[in-house]
Image (cartoon, grey):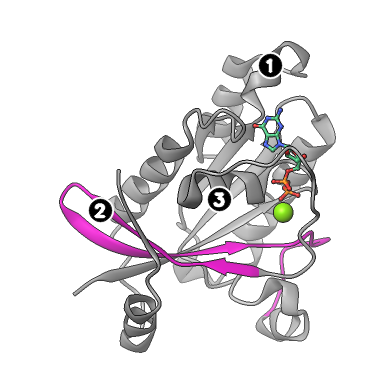
Amino acid sequence: MVETLSIAVIGAPGVGKTSIIRQFIYNDFSEAYTPTRTRYVYRPSVILNGNMYELKILDVPPISSFPSSSSQEWLDLRCRGVRNANAYILVYDICCVESFEYVKMIRQQIVEHRESSNSEVPILVVGNKRDLQRQRFMPRRAVSVLVKKTWKCGYVECSAKFNWHVVLLFKELLGIAVARGMRQNHTSIRLQGALQRNRCAIM
Ligand code: GDP
Ligand code: MG
């Protein structure tokens, strides 16, 4: 049985969420900025350690906060599926402190607003635009310690532009999710994932 893992990618506008996803799936990068206005779902398949997984990657457009209830999620089309994602990638720009503050707020809200049984959901914080690291606002080590030790989240830095650590970050997240036994998906979701499979990558 192929497992489906839904991953919500959240972050402030312009940090590179769409670029990371498109680099991962299509090996494609565009310098031009096209703001993501509606929620977009990508369905690649990946093989990790000999096992196949269907990923449902949600490219979440800017949201002011993590939906605090199911009704809020259903009223706002941009957040569909966000509360029940199996894992989160929270992206910030290593040169933009406000984008880090946003990630900090969303991480806190995920911990507070998810159902208690799901509170151990894997969260990977990603510092993007590593190629611009001379302009970074905080040393990598300091952020990494804060995120890993205090927030208890994974931490990876990448550059969507140069495809540095993009596969690694998905591998890292999937590894954490699999280790925590993410097997809560309904059968119909698994089937849907298999039918709409459009890409496969070996990681
Ligand atoms: P989103 O709003 O978070 O989805 O951000 P986008 O993926 O649309 O990227 C916003 C802008 O940042 C675009 O102009 C991209 O070309 C640029 N960008 C994305 N990733 C990188 C990166 O790793 N390095 C650099 N230098 N620019 C990037
Ligand atoms: Mg986008």
Q: Residue at x 55, y 50 (%)?
A: 21
| Quarter in which the C terminus is drawn | top left
- The image quadrant that residue 140 belongs to is top right
The range drawn in magenta is 40-69
Placement of 2 over or under 87, stated as above or below: below
Tell me whether circle 3 and circle 1 mark residues in contact (CB < 8 Å): no
Beta carbon at label 2 within 8 Å of ligand 1? no
Q: Amino acid at mark 2?
A: Ile
Number of marks present in the image shown: 3
User: Residue at point 29% right, 62% down?
Assistant: 53
Q: Earlier in the sequence, mark 3 or mark 2?
A: 3
Q: Mark 1 near mark 2, Cβ–Cβ under 8 Å?
A: no
Q: Residues within 10 Å of mark 1 (few under 14, many from 20)?
A: some
Going 72% across and 17% down the picture, which residue do you hit?
138
What distance separates the C-alpha of mark 1 from that of mark 2? 31 Å
Displayed-image quarter of ligand 1: top right
The picture quadrant where one finds residue 5 is bottom left
**Left or right of 106: which side holds 188?**
left
Q: Which mark is residue 133?
A: 1
Verify whether residue 52 appears in magenta: yes
Q: Amino acid at mark 3?
A: Ile
Is the CB of mark 3 within 8 Å of ligand 1?
yes
> In the rendering, at what x and y percent does residue 149 appear?
52, 30
Tag 1: residue type?
Answer: Gln
Q: Which residue is mark 3?
A: 21
Front: mark 3 or 1: 3
Residue 47, label in figure: 2
Between discs 1 and 2, the one toward the N terminus: 2
Q: Nearer the viewer, residue 57 or 143?
A: 57
Q: Secondary structure at mark 2?
A: strand
Q: Residue at point 62% right, 41% down? A: 29
